[in-house]
Image: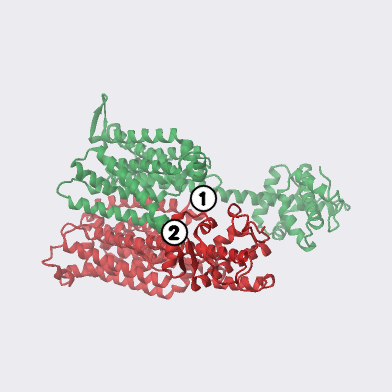
Chain colours: A green, B red
Amino acid sequence: MNWLWPADWSWQLDGWIILAGVLCAVSAALVGNFLVLRRLSLLGDAISHAVLPGLAIAFLATASRSSWPMFLGAVVAGLVTAGATQWIRTAGKVDEGASLGIVFTCLFAFGLVLIVQAADRVDLDPGCVLYGAIETTPLDQVSWLGWKLPRVVWVLGGVLLLNVLAVGLLFKEFKVSSFDPAMSTALGIPANAMHALLMVLVAITAVASFESVGNILVVAMLVVPPAAAQLISERLGRVIVWSLLIAVISAVLGHWMATVVPRAFGFRAVSTAAMIAVASGLLFLVCFLIGPYQGLLWRWWQRRTTAAEMLAEDVVGWLFRQEEKSAAADTVVRIVEARMGELASSMGVSTTALRRTVNRLARRGLLRNEAGGFQLTAVGRDEGQRVVRAHRLWEQYLVEQAEVPLSRIHEHAERFEHITTARMREALAEQTEGTERDPHGSRIPPEN
Amino acid sequence: MIWEWSISWLALPDDLWRVLSLRDYNTRVVVLGTALLGAAAGVIGSFALLRKRALLGDALSHAMLPGIALAYLAAVWLGAEGKSVPLLLFGATLSGLLGTCCVLGIRHWTRLKEDAALSIVLSVFFGAGVALLGIVQQTARGHAAGLESFVFGKASALAIEDAWVIMGGGLVCVLLVSLFFKEWKLLCFDETFAASNGWPVVGLDWLMMFLIVLISVVGLQAVGLVLMIALLVIPPAAARFWTDDLRTMVWLAGVLGCVSSFGGAIVSALLPRLPSGAMIVLFAGAIFLVSLLLGTRRGVFYQAWQSWSLQQRIQRQHLLRAMFELSELQEVHSGSSVGQPVPVDFERLQAMRSWSKRQLAAEVRRAISAGLVIPLSPSQLRLTAAGQQLAARLVHQHRLWELYLITHAELAPSKVDRDADRIEHVLTPEMIARLERLLNASQQGGSVPVSPHPILPPAAVEPAGGGRP
C-alpha cells in the first residue's frame, strides 16, 4: 500500500490542499449544473477569461490585493460579459458561440493591456491566474473567530455557503427558469433576474477559484461533474447530488494522481489543479461508458441481452413448430449437436451463439438434454406455444385488419412476436375474432 | 496568462514612418506574419461561423497542449531534440484532432449539447496538458525548452521561420477553401440536401475541421491561444454584417482579419507597453463594433433605418388610401363624376383611422411636400393627380386581398379589412398580378374593385353618409 499512500503525506499540508480542492469543485459544480442545463457551459469559460479587466481595474483603483474590490470588479465584469453577449446575439443576430468568443477575447485583451500598462504598480502573478496555486494553500493562514484556517479555505468556504444558500433557497426558481423561461415568467419568476443571479454566482465562483485552480481549470469544475451526472440520472435533484459527489471524488482523486502517479515514473508531483481536471475527465469517461440508459457499455449490454432473448424465443418457437409437424409420427424433436450449424445458419446467427443459447435454455429448464440432443420440457413447450401463438395471431391480424400483403406478414410477425405480452395476445385474438387458423393455414395454438 | 502572448517589448521605434514602412526587420516579420495569419483565419473562420462552430477553435487550441507536451517527452525519451518544431506541431495536430473526435463523440452518443462537449474537451485536455508540462519542466532540458512560451505564443518576437510556417499554412487554407468552396457552401446552408445529393458530408466536414486545427496549430505558436480564437471568430462575424453573399463574406473576413492584425501590430510597435496580441484583438473588436452598428446588411442602424422607413411608407399609404376611400364615398353621395379627386375634410379623414390629430397633420405635411396632396383650405385637402394614381393602386391592392380572403380563404367580409390592412404594404407586383388573374372572374371591371365591406368604421358612420354595400 506504500505506493497508494505516500509516506510524506500529511494532513497539515495535503489535507488543506484536498479541502481547498473539494470546496472549489463542489461550489463550482453546484452552479455549473444550471449552466449545463441552460446550454451555457461555454459562458463559464468566457466569464473566467473576461473577469480579468474587472480584476485589473479593481487593482488599479485600490492599489491593493484586498478581496472585496476584486470580487466587485469580477462580478461587474461577469455581468458585462453576459449582457454584452446577449446584446450582440439579439441586436446583431450573431450565433451564441460566436458572440461569446467576441466578448471574452476582447475583454481579456483589454484586461491584459490594463495590467501591462500598470505593470509597475500591480503585482499580479500571471501563472497563478492561469494554473492556480493550490499547493500554496496551507502557507497563507488567517485567523478569524478564533479559527486559524488557510485564507483560501475561508474564501472558498464562503463561496460554497453562498452558492448553497442561493441554490437551496431558490431551487424551484432556478429549475423552472432553466427549463422553461416563458413558463417561469408566467409563474411570476423573473427569468432574466434568475439568469443575472446565476451569472453573478458563476463570476464569484470563478474569481474565488482562480487563486487555487486557475481560470481554465475552473471550467472543468463548472462543467464536467454536472455533465457526467447528467449521464447518470435524469432528475435534476439527483443530477445535482451526483455532480457534487463526482466533484468531491475528482478533487480527492486529483490530488492523489498529482502526487502519486508522477512518482511512479520517477518524477516529482505535478499541479493538483490540473490533475483534478483530468480526474473529473476520467470520471466523465466512466459515466460515458457505464452510465445507465445512455452509457456505451450499458447500451451494448442491453442490445446483447435483447438479441440473446430473442434468439432463445426463436429456438423454443422452432422446436414447438417441429413438434407440431411431427405430432402424428409421435417422434421426439431434438436439436442435435451435429445439425446445430445448419439450424444456426437458417436462423441467421453463429453456431457459437446458438449453442450458448441452447445451453442457457437448458439451465433455465426450458430444454432438457437427453439422448444426445436437446428437447423441450413442459415449461419450454408452453413458452414455445406462446411465441408461436403470438406470431400467428399477428399474421392473421396484419392480413385482416392492417391489410398487409401476404408476402410481407412473416417478417413483421417475426419481430412483433418478441414484444407481445399476454394482454396483447388477448387483444389480438379479440381483433381477429378467435380465428382458428392463420393466413398460411396453420393452426393458432390456444393460450396456455 | 501574460505569456499567452509572451510580451517582450519591441524596441521603441524612432518614428512613425519607420514602423509604417516596415523598415525594421523585426517589425516587418511580426506585422506581415500576423497579417497573413489574420487573413487565413478569417477565411476558414467564416465557414466555422456559418457551421455554428465558432468556438470549436477555442476547444481545439486548448486541446493541443497535451499533444505538444507528449511530443516533447517522446522526443526526449527517444534521445532526439525535443524542441523540433515539426514534431511538436505534429503532436499538437494529433491531439487537436483527438479533441475534435471527443467533441463529436460526446455529441453523438450522449444527450449533452455542443457547448458542454466543447467545455469538457477544452478543460480536461488543458488540465492534462498542464500536468504533462509539469513533467516536462522536470526533465533535464525542460527549462531550456521554454515550451510554455512556445505554446502560448510570442507575437512580438515572431521569427522569420514562424512567418514561413504561417505562410505555408495560410496558403494551404486558401487553396483548399477555393477548391471546396461550392461543397462547403452547400454544407453550411443545407447539410441534409448535400447528403441526399450524395456529397461526402462527413468527409467535407472533417476536412473543414482539419483546416481549423491546422490554422490553429500554425497560429498558436505564433500568437497564442486567446488571439487565435479571436482571429477565427471576430473577423467573420464582423464581415457577416456587410454582406449576404458567402463569397464576399469569406474574402471580406480575410481582409478584416488582415487589417486588424496589421493595425494591432503597428500600434503595438509604435507605442510603449501595448502587447501586440492584445492590441490585435482589440483592433478586431473595434472593427466588429463598427460593423455591428453600421453594417449595410445586418447592422443595428441599418435595421433601425429599415424599420423606420417601412413605418413611414405604411403611414403614407394609410393616408392616401383613407383619402381615396373618403372621396369615393363623397362621390357616390353627391353623384359627381367618378375618378376625379374630390376635396376631403380633415375632420372626416381623422375619423377614418385611429390616428391623432398631430400624427395626421404631420403625415399630411409630408405628403404635401412629396406632391401627393394639395391643401385647399385649413380644413380641406385634395389628392393631386399623382397622389390619386398612387392611392388608386393601393386601394386596388387592398381590395384584391380582401376579395381573395373572402373567396378563397372563406373569411367573413367584416373580418378582412384588418388583415388586408397589414398585408397591403408588402404585396409584390408579382403577387398582385397573380391575385388579379385569380380573381378575374369575380371582378366587375374597372381598375379599382368595389369594397366588399362598409368603408367607414361603424362608430364614424354618419346617418347621411351611411355604409355602402
Amino acid at dot 1: Arg
In terms of sequence position, does the residue under pointer 1 or pointer 2 come before the other?
1
Q: Is residue B272 left or right of residue A302?
A: left
Taking depth in this image into account, of A441 and A44 the one nearest to the observer is A44
Q: Is residue B176 left or right of residue B405?
A: left
Residue at position x 73%, y 59% in the image:
A411
Label 2 neighbour load within 10 Å: few <14, some 14-19, many 20+:
some
Taking depth in this image into account, of A36 and B110 the one nearest to the observer is A36
Q: Is residue B15 left or right of residue A278?
A: left
Q: What is the chain identity of the residue bearing mark 2?
A: B
Q: What is the chain identity of the residue bearing mark 1?
A: B
Picture coordinates of residue A146 (x, y %)? 26, 24
Q: Which residue is mark 2?
A: B361
Q: CA distance from mark 1 to mark 2?
A: 60 Å
State the mark number for residue B111: 1
Name the front one of labels 1 and 2.
2
Q: Is residue A343 above or below residue A12?
A: below
Residue reaching furthest to the left: B14
Q: Dots 1 and 2: beta carbons under 8 Å?
A: no
Question: Total number of numbered labels?
Answer: 2
Residue at position x 27%, y 48% in the image:
A52
Taking depth in this image into account, of B212 and B35 the one nearest to the observer is B35
Q: Is residue B99 visible?
A: yes
Q: Is residue A253 above or below residue A373?
A: above
Amino acid at dot 2: Ala
Taking depth in this image into account, of A154 and B452 the one nearest to the observer is B452
